[in-house]
């Protein structure tokens, strides 16, 4: 099986879970009921035997696809020799379902269409309940929920045949479920698949068993429509009824468009900025406020290599930067929700701060390799969990303090415990003031003093001082005096040890390498974009990190990296360069680079982590919050220069 291009995918989200669907109608990545649950469609990282659901029009071709305006509802128009049809796909936003009574394991008689292979798979799966941190059934707060994915098909002209194949595989494609026919709580016949604590029901016209797959072919004539709904539910509960499609669609559209509101965006970039704002919300957990870095795991930064990471967790840095972008466009509510998530996550022990947490704020994110998956384009290992959670990265508190300062500037009042916890973060940073770290890019080599990280240490104390002197937050005179002293010491240290002979900032103290993260120095308020040291740094970045196609790398991997292989230009860094150009009177270059970066998105304005300019394709996890927040900030920077 040839892996579909990353950019061929669209994202579906109900703000608790996500799915990826290809242009030709194959859902090959689906985690339910949470972003970080075990995938039950995992063909993206293996093959079709690892789980997928294809729905297409027989002998048809896709004429167009789009999101309905202001939503994450996908609409695809197909044409076949006999007619045309529109497929509408979405994950309804309806809140939690009723708990129900009784077990979903026995709601009807055996179905003779279900093969022996289904029963065999059921025995294997039944002996292995959902395992690990991603097990959907073990997650507090979601056990009484259900989650739906809707695929609605309407024949517009002539006659069409809808053809499908469904292979449900739990535990990242490893467990073949026990499959049978039964009834949902409304008495409708459904196909039910169970493995451990996870249950899946397919509502709609029946599919029939073919080995370990289920297939169907259904004819529609002009004006006719039908729907299939895939529902996750805890396997010990009654199978929920399918939502009423029209009302679910109306409510979902209203939720997306209502949140987007009357956002004012520069007309030239309205479509990509609007989509980027929606992606940030799609990656934000509706209940907890946690913002994940991307919807996927292990899409490679180096095709065929080992740079494959799980991004379905909440990095404090990524979320903080995302919130700054949302705040700039009036979404104070998202900032308040995330601040509450942050406080819960770190409240247990601020002195053991992690750089990332689960969407509920859990700390335990062990990294493991999934050996049965072949990897996207043979990129192994496929990793679940992320070992970087145990790293010390000196910049993280600074990023968080900058975001919390922006919230104060936007008028969001501190809660009874938000300022005390910020003071605890300052204390945490002060305790580790002389400790080297792994840097913003989570280097797996030896710790070092990364200049960007030291600037963010400076920002930690700078924003703490500002909170007291500008916003009136309580602190003793002794505390403020000490914070100022540390802030000034760190600044002097950076200017002495973090600047090379050419006047440019260096990646680490004593190094001659440069790093694109240094483009964030003006954003932290450490120096303006047109300072001679910044101009020298940009010149070095252009010289050392710019690729033949004009994009820039994060850093040269031969240095501090600690891993084999290479990688492609990192899109958020390219957007940071747009900001830098715009703020240092290089408007024409800023606009030219911006246009090039917009060309790195797919037809739905979605962006991955990286872009391989030589091959003209996306790389890395998808869609990437970092890339989308970078786009928003770059457009905002261009708007400032135009005003």
Image: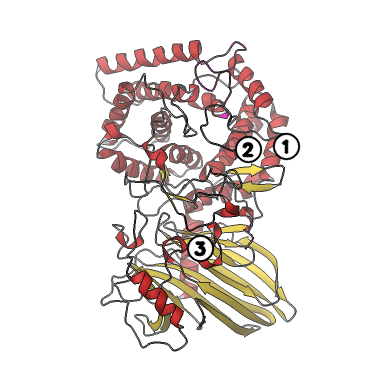
SS for dot 2: loop
Badges 3 and 1: C-beta atoms under 8 Å apart?
A: no
Query: Residue 531 appears at what percent x and percent y?
Result: 59, 16
Q: Is residue 506 magenta?
A: yes
Q: CA distance from mark 2 to mark 3?
A: 35 Å
User: In the displayed structure, does residue 320 sit left or right of residue 267?
Assistant: left
Instruction: Identify residue for label 2.
Output: 569
- How packed mark 2 is, by other alpha carbons closer than 10 Å (few <14, some 14-19, many 20 or more), is many
Q: Which residues are magenta?
A: 501-516
Residue lying farthest to the right in this orientation: 81
Q: Quadrant of residue 430?
A: top left
Q: Could you tell me which secondary element the residue under label 1 belongs to?
A: loop
Q: Are marks 2 and 1 in contact (CB under 8 Å)?
A: yes
Determine the residue positioned at 53% across, 72% down: 151
Q: Mark 1 sits on what residue?
A: 549
Residue 625 is left or right of residue 100, and the answer is: right
**Which secondary structure class fits the magenta region best?**
loop
**Quadrant containing the C terminus in the rendered view:** top right
Query: Where does label 3 land, which residue?
Result: 253
Where residue 181 appears, as percent x and y from the top left, is 41, 83
């Amino acid at each position: 099986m040839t892996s579909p291009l990353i950019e061929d995918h669209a994202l579906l989200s109900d703000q608790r879970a996500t799915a990826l669907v290809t242009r030709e109608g194959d859902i090959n990545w689906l985690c339910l009921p949470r972003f970080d649950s075990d995938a039950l469609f995992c063909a993206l990282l293996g093959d079709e035997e690892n789980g997928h659901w294809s729905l297409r029009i027989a002998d048809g071709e896709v004429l167009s696809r789009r999101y309905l305006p202001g939503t994450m509802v996908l609409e695809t128009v197909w044409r076949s020799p006999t007619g045309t049809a529109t497929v509408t796909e979405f994950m309804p936003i309806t809140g939690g379902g009723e708990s129900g009574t009784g077990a979903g394991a026995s709601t009807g008689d055996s179905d003779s269409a279900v093969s022996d292979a289904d029963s065999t798979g059921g025995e294997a799966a039944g002996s292995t309940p959902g395992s690990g941190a991603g097990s959907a059934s073990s997650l507090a707060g979601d056990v009484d929920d259900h989650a739906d994915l809707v695929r609605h098909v309407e024949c517009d002209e002539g006659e069409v045949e809808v053809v499908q194949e469904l292979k449900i595989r739990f535990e990242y494609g490893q467990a073949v479920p026990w499959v049978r026919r039964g009834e949902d709580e409304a008495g409708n016949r459904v196909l039910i698949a169970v493995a451990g604590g996870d249950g899946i029901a397919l509502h709609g016209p029946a599919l029939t068993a073919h080995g370990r797959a289920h297939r169907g072919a259904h004819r529609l004539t002009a004006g006719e429509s039908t729907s299939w709904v895939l529902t996750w539910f805890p396997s010990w509960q009654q199978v929920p009824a399918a939502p009423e499609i029209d009302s679910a669609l109306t409510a979902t559209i209203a939720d997306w468009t209502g949140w987007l509101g009357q956002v004012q965006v520069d007309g030239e970039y309205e479509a990509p900025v609007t989509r980027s704002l929606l992606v940030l919300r799609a990656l934000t957990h509706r209940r907890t406020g946690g913002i994940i870095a991307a919807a996927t795991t292990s899409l490679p930064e180096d095709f065929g290599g080992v740079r494959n990471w799980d991004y379905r967790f909440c990095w404090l840095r990524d979320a903080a930067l995302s919130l700054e972008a949302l705040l700039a466009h009036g979404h104070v509510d998202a900032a308040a929700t995330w601040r509450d998530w942050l406080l819960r996550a770190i409240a247990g022990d601020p002195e053991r701060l992690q750089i990332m947490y689960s969407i509920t704020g859990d700390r335990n994110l062990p990294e493991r390799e999934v050996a049965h998956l072949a990897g996207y384009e043979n990129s192994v290992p496929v990793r679940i969990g992320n070992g970087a959670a145990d790293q010390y990265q000196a910049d993280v508190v600074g990023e968080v303090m900058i975001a919390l300062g922006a919230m104060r500037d936007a008028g969001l009042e501190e809660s009874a415990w938000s300022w005390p916890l910020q003071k605890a973060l300052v204390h945490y940073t002060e305790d580790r003031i002389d400790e080297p770290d792994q840097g913003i890019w989570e280097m797996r080599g030896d710790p070092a003093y990364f200049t960007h990280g030291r600037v963010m240490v400076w920002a930690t104390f700078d924003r703490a001082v500002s909170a007291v002197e500008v916003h009136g937050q309580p602190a003793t005179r002794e505390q403020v005096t000490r914070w100022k002293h540390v802030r000034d010491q760190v600044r002097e240290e950076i200017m002495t040890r973090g600047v090379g002979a050419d006047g440019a900032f260096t990646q680490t103290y004593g190094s001659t390498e440069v790093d694109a993260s240094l483009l964030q120095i003006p954003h932290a308020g450490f120096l303006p974009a047109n300072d001679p040291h910044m101009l020298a740094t940009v010149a070095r970045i252009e010289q050392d990190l710019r690729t033949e196609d004009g994009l820039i790398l994060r850093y040269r991997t031969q240095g501090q990296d600690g891993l084999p292989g290479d990688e492609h230009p990192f899109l958020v860094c390219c957007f940071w360069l747009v900001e830098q150009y715009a703020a240092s009177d290089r408007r024409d270059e800023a606009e030219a680079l911006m246009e090039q970066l917009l060309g790195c998105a797919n037809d739905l304005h979605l962006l991955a982590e990286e872009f391989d300019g030589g091959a003209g394709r996306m790389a890395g996890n998808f869609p990437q919050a970092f890339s989308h927040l970078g786009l928003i900030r770059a457009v905002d920077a261009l708007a400032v220069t135009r005003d």
